Structure formats: C-alpha cells, structure tokens
Image (cartoon, rainbow, N blue to C red):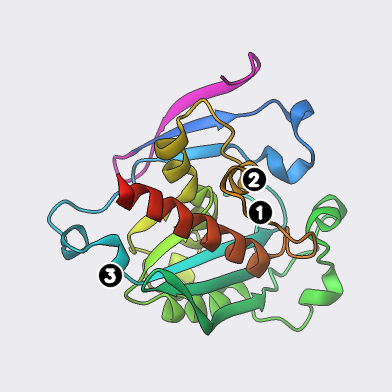
Amino acid sequence: GWPEETNARIKATDDDGFTLVIDLPTEQLETPVAARPLAFDFSTSLAANSEWMQTGLGDLCFVVLDTETTGMSVSDDDIIQIGALRVLNRQIVPGEVFDTYVNPGRAIPAASSRIHRIIDADIADAPDSARAAKQLHHFARDAVLVAHNAPFDIGMLKRLEAKIDWRWDHPVLDTVLMSAVVFGTHEDHSLDALCERLGINIPSADRHTALGDAKITAGAFLRLMAVLEGR
C-alpha cells in the first residue's frame, strides 16, 4: 500500500531494540515537516515483569506530548516548544497542561518557522532546554508517555538526559504504532490522516503548535485505546 518510492528499513537501537523506519517520498507530502520518517519503535515496549503490564490501560495515567523543533534531525536539531497534557480515567484532565517555549541558544531556521510560526523573538526569554526538560520530567512523573511518532519526540528528550541528570525511562506508547495495529501498516499513519480516519477535527490554528498537536494526539489516542480495548 506504500508508494513505490517508499523506503522501509530496520534500525537497531542503543538499548538492543529495533525500529522500523518508513520514509515517504517528499514530493507527495504537503509540507517539509511531514517528511519526518514515521517510525515504528519496538524498543519502548513495557518490561514484561513490570507493574505497568499488570494494569489495564484505562487505569494508567498518561502524559501526551509533542515538540516543535529547529528541524527534523533528532541528532542535530533542538526543541523550541513543548506541549503536554494529562489523560486519566479515559479523559483529558482540564487544567493539567504543560506548555512552554524553549530557548535552544541558536537561531530558528526560516524554513522551520514557516511551518510552526515560531520565530526567534518568541523564544528569546524562554527557559533553556535543560530547565524546560526538568519541568516536563516533573510534570510527567509516574505517567506513561504518549506521542505521535514517538521516536522523534522521545529521542529529542533523551538527548537532554545528561543535562538534567534524570533518565527518560517512562513507558511509551506511540499512536503511530497503535494506528498500524488497528488499521494495518498499509495505511497512511500521519497525524492528519489518522485524525481524518477517526473523525477528529483539526483546527488550523492548533496544527504545528506543540500543545495543539498534543491535544490532537490525545484525542486520537483515546479513540484508538477504545478500539483496542474493544478487541
């Protein structure tokens, strides 16, 4: 079901896991940011003997997050905005929100600003990456992290572990992988395509903002969770 130009490859991860990376041909994508390869990361699965595995999905606490960045490289780019919200008892908890700009200590490329509309003036007085990561880590304590294309966002956060002296060892659920389980790997699993499939409206003002995309991802996650529980 993927275009002929699609490239899929298996990559080993540092923690002896494996990632299936699917590169979509960029000429078929609407915007450069969508060219982030969708990754099905199997290294973030829950430990079989952990208490997490003994708890039903509906009884867990989740923090759904998204980041905006200077570019699309986990190794070379930096976070400039983080948005997160809490999901408990199968619903988004009102007021439990984390939303901040991040000053990466570098200029934001114009090509990236055209996508997320964040410019250097927006981040001038923002906390640096270490402070923002510490605040998010505190917000997400004792929670399962949820992200769309989680290897990108979690990979950006893991790069900051040395700066904050804390590990991002939370269990992780990826709505890309959940979508692949529910709808099959032959489907388009971009956030826009997933929301269209699930009947979720995406306000244009929210798209490509960290908190806006986190809210959209949370809505998709709750619907996917209901489908999976029904099975």
Q: Quadrant location of the N terminus?
A: top right
Q: Nearer the viewer, mark 3 or mark 2?
A: 2
Q: Is residue 157 left or right of residue 165?
A: right
Residue 202 percent across, percent down from the top left: 70, 57
Whether residue 14 appears in magenta in the rendering, the answer is yes
Question: Percent from the top left, x then y, of residue 210?
Answer: 65, 65
N-term mark: 3 or 2:
3
Mark 2 lies on residue: 196
Q: Quadrant of the C terminus?
A: top left
**Residue 108: x %, y % from top left:** 80, 61
Q: Is residue 2 magenta?
A: yes
Q: What residue does disc 1 label?
A: 77
137 relative position to 95: left or right: left
How many neighbours does mark 2 have within 10 angstroms: few (below 14), some (14-19), or many (20 or more)? few
Report the residue at 71% width, 81% height from top.
126
Give the secondary structure at mark 3: helix
Question: Residue type at mark 1?
Answer: Asp
Q: Which residue is mark 3?
A: 59
The magenta-colored residue range is: 1-17
Q: Is residue 89 above or below residue 145?
A: below
Report the Cα–Cα distance between label 3 and label 2: 27 Å
Q: Amino acid at mark 2?
A: Glu
